[in-house]
Image (cartoon, rainbow, N blue to C red):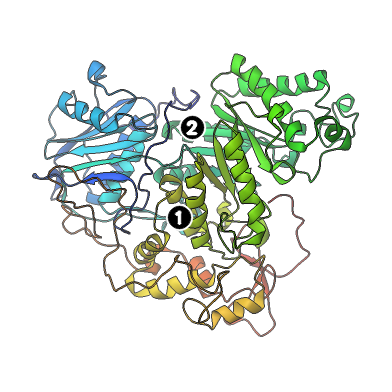
Amino acid sequence: MNDAPYEGQADALRRRGFLVGAAGLAGAALLPGLTATGAAAATAQPAGAPLKVVSGGRAGATLLWWGGGSAEFAATELRDYLHRITGARLPLRAVPDPGAARPEGVTGLVALYAGTGARDAIPEARLADAGRELSGAPEDSFTLLGDNTCLLLTGQGDRAPLYAVYALLERTGVRFFAPAFPAYEGHHEYVPKTRTLALPAVRLTDRPGSQLRRQYAEEGFSHTAKSLPPLLDWMAKNRLNTYVHPTDYLGLGVTTYDGVRDVLVREAGKRALRVETGGHGYDSFLPKADYPQYYASGGPLFDIYNPEALDAYVAKVLAFLRERPEITVFDCWPPDVGAFQKPILDRYGSPANAESVVVNELVRVLREELPGVRVERIAYASTVQPPDPEYASDPEVIVDFAPYSRNYDGHLGDPATGANVSFAKALRAWRTTHRGPLAMYEYYRRYRWRSLPVHPLATIAGDVGFEAALGINGYGMYSEPGDWITYEHVQNLFAALAWDSTLDAGAFLDGYLRARFGARAAAATGRYYDLTRLDPDTHGPGRAHHELHAGPCGPPGGDRAGGRCGGAHRARPADPQPRHRSGRHEDRPGSGGQHRTRHRPPGVPGARAPQPVHRHLPAQHAGLVAMERPAGPGTVRRRGDPPGRRRHVCESGGRLRQPGPPRARTGR
């Protein structure tokens, strides 16, 4: 028996690479039991007796695990959550390598086996079944295959066993709403309670719809070594696979990779999450103060046409990466400036061409020296258009498309949203010309919104649908722990869409509101989300006041920019049960087409449904719900405040402060 907590970190320093294979069908990422969607999981309910895990508080099954990556941690997570649900602690044992019976691409597995006697192997027939389910599936695909004797949880690559475990826990009624930040006071998730747990037979295989599913720290002024473990924990539970932390954001020495590295290696390693760093500023590695000879053209870029300068930059990056073997992707981004200096533009013709010179040389060197590291460039501001054909990016380069000055009145591909038309055209051009991965860097939580509640849910869903149709390979957005409560549902929706671009955002919101706040509060909280859907950059306080008094979906006959909810929150018949997140459904023999899970999951007698808001959220969230619409840029008025009093929402989002001098913008 092995009941010790996870401690092994031998695998933490291995670079998390990319399995070969195109992305398959988009998979379901909704919380089961929340909504019904047309996503892309193959799920069925085979006939047969359930697996009796716990009866009357006594363990009736054994947990087995094998492999590297997240397998051991996944097994301990399942054991610990089952203990929280039932009060019983299941035996946990490692088993030998299945050898030739192990399906191709499987690096680890977890299994629940009926009974508490000695077990030392997984049935070969079950492993063969998993091999058939996972044949041709992309990395991170996972499968749950179980009957009354054995439930196997595995998949393609190092993260798959952990994803499978969390999918199983969701089927028992567990809900993963947010990271366990202190502001939540323990209300970041819901864990049902029951003394008896029996798991129905299951055949479920889920595939991701995108290769890169990322969370950025970006400016990271409220990110700390203490906030990182709960964030990475939430990422794994919501099927994200890459965490991005700046090497040294804008060279300020505040948000630095090395400042959190020890914690990141430990926490990302046991979850098998990829680690990415770099960011704006070649000068982070080649500062002008230390290398003035490489800035004869004046800056902000070093003289990239000078072979000695370019070699010096590449050598600095190479040395940095050699000393940090956990890094999988390096963001080779130019400084965050509006324009490059004239001597560079005169030589190369455009900023994008100049960026290609640096990126392609770094790729060439890393291909020989550190082939496990991918290089990313950013299509942003002056480099948003692709380079000329003679400066095309190496196909191994990841391109991150960042439509910084867009707005959120409509999705990126909507021709009626004028501010976004040029970005849609540029994105199509990148997809046509770049032969490698193309990902989105989005701004659904902007610093300049000053932590105000902004929830453009229909726009987010429309964006991902448009981008998925173009063949986008990944999605990412940034966060701050300090105001996560404000953007909780935006983060959840974005993570879900990154896994399944076909997700119904309206159904997802309905299910979230019922599960998070309770059925009686769903209508009121739904109105809150509808009233906060507008982009504050294009809708001032006058329009917001009009919306506040215009009915649940805006003024009658509302305009396309924001007068109607656009489908993110639509009226629905009364339904006391939340809908199950299912994927693109493939009926299997004996399934009868059943793919819905209710609050009280089958085979979980006595499992209680989530309670209303006061059981799930601290006082801070209730205060946010009670806030009126913005009284001015960056301000709010709370109920009970005297007329004329305005409060600023601080960047950290934790408290409100009185108005003061505006903080200089240092980024996005």
Question: Which of the two discs, 1 and 2, sits closer to the camera?
Answer: 1
Residue 356 seen in the current view: yes
Task: Choose between 134 and 63: the one closer to the eye.
Answer: 134
Which structural element holds mark 2?
A: helix
Mark 1 residue element: helix
Per the image, the residue denoted by label 1 is 493
Q: Is residue 222 above or below residue 549?
A: above
Q: In the current view of this chain or complex, which residue is farthest to the top? A: 368
Which amino acid, by three-letter code, is at mark 2?
Answer: Arg
* Residue for badge 2: 266
Q: Position of residue 564 (x, y in %)?
A: 50, 73
Residue at (12% x, 30% y) in the render: 117
Label 1, label 2: how far apart the Cα atoms are: 27 Å
Q: Residues within 10 Å of mark 1 (few under 14, many from 20)?
A: many
Q: Does residue 168 sit above or below 648 in this rendering? A: above
Which mark is first along the chain, 2 or 1?
2
Report whether residue 651 is seen.
no
Q: How many marks?
A: 2
Q: What residue is shown at x 59% (from left), y 75% (from top)?
A: 629
Q: What kind of residue is marked 1?
A: Leu
From the viewer's perspective, tell me whether residue 290 is left or right of residue 323: right
Task: State the image coordinates of residue 547 (x, y, percent, origin top left).
Answer: 56, 78
